[in-house]
Amino acid sequence: MKPFLNSTADYHRRHLESLGWELTVCAMLQQPSSPCRRILMENGSYGSHLDAFLARHLDWNGVRRVLEVGGGYGHLMRDLLTAHPHLTAVMLDISPLLLDRQRETLGPDAAEFLLQDFFDFDVGRLAGFDLAIFNENIGDFPALCGLTAEVLGGTGGGTDLETTRCLIRDYGLSLPDGSFVFNLGAALAVEKLCGARIPALFISEHSCEAVVPAAYKAFMHLPSSGRPERIRLKGHDEYTIKFSHLERIARAMQYECWRGPYADFLSIEWTDELRFIMTSGSGRDEHEAIRQFFEDLYRYEYLLLLKRE
Ligand SMILES: C[S@@+](CC[C@H](N)C(=O)[O-])C[C@H]1O[C@@H](n2cnc3c(N)ncnc32)[C@H](O)[C@@H]1O
């Protein structure tokens, strides 16, 4: 197979009508009545949990300008602005429909709204932010598919392939056997953000390197091949993320890295009810939702990157 670039840009610009088909963890926790909130130690939205987690690593009083890329319906930023009214927020999204939804959620004057592909965003402007958030969107970024060691060992083949060769060589990224996919957009995004020296970066997505803790191995099995896998969604495909590559790029660019599953900041309360839900195979809608949510807490990883002084 000849290498080809998977892009979701056209889908997001022209065809996306709703995020209903790709229920994010943020969306699962949005409603106060969400059954998923019941299994958490603290009943709260995704944004309130992330806010508390970030407060363990950074001083919110020192954060002024925040950029959120791909903010979906805007709920995460709404929570952050409610908790920290001194913040100046910029919402950047490639989808006109979702940017409108963000404007509705936040109010037209609560942030600056930029309709743009992140890869076209000026790197000089990036340098003005104290914090940038990429929540469950880097799987949408371009992925270079159909790669092999032989193709990578050759020369030419176009800009995407040549850029991939440079990234793999410059950062010493490991390569799997056989045919594989490279998270080209995600790698370039981390390089661009770290190159702009933004003090704090939060990035999260569906991982291809998920690890289930020993205590929960009897209750869930997550495929974790270590290679980006295709996820077929309405109107587009996205790819799971090889976080070890992104971590390696960030460390090489002098960032400290915290990496882990969502369960690090969405702490579970392990109860008899949860054990029943995870073992009974109950078909109740609410139980299905909780099973998916519980698995997502390990299926999704985050990277928190802090610039070294
Ligand atoms: C799956 S949604 C995640 C929404 C939200 N962050 C959440 O967690 O619920 C992906 C978001 O990224 C945006 N997006 C995808 N590719 C983008 C790009 N190249 N530049 C800017 N935004 C992009 C989409 O329009 C959408 O808002």
Image (cartoon, helix red, strand yellow):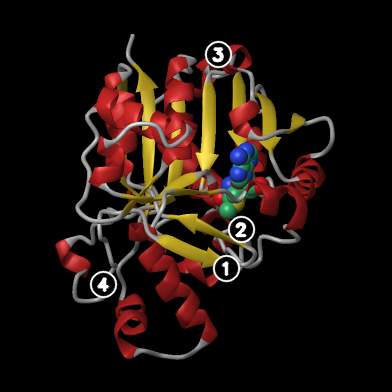
Residue 33 placed where, x, y %? 61, 68
Q: Residue at x 64, y 24 (%)?
A: 121
Mark 3 or mark 2: which comes first in sequence?
2
**Disc 4: residue Cβ within 8 A of ligand 1's nearest atom:** no
Mark 1 or mark 3: which comes first in sequence?
1
Task: Tell me the CA gap for discs 1 and 3.
Answer: 38 Å
Task: Tell me the CA gap for discs 4 and 2.
Answer: 26 Å
| Amino acid, disc 1 | Ser
Please give left or right for residue 143 compared with residue 89 in the image: left
| Amino acid, disc 3 | Ala
For disc 4, the marked residue is 221
Mark 4 or mark 2: which comes first in sequence?
2
Please tell me whether mark 1 or mark 3 is closer to you in this view. 3
Tell which residue pokes out farthest to the top in this image: 309
Q: Is residue 70 visible?
A: no
Relative to 12, residue 252 above or below: above
Task: Tell me the CA gap for discs 3 and 2.
Answer: 31 Å
Task: Using the image, tell me which numbered label, if any, was put on residue 127.
Answer: 3
Q: Tag count in the figure? A: 4
Task: Using the image, tell me which numbered label, if any, was put on residue 30.
Answer: 2
Residue 147 placed where, x, y %? 34, 48
Task: Tell me the CA gap for discs 1 and 4.
Answer: 24 Å
Tag 1 secondary structure: loop
Please tell me whether mark 4 or mark 2 is closer to you in this view. 4
Mark 3 or mark 4: which comes first in sequence?
3
Task: Using the image, tell me which numbered label, if any, was put on residue 34.
Answer: 1
Please give left or right for residue 124 compared with residue 251 in the image: right
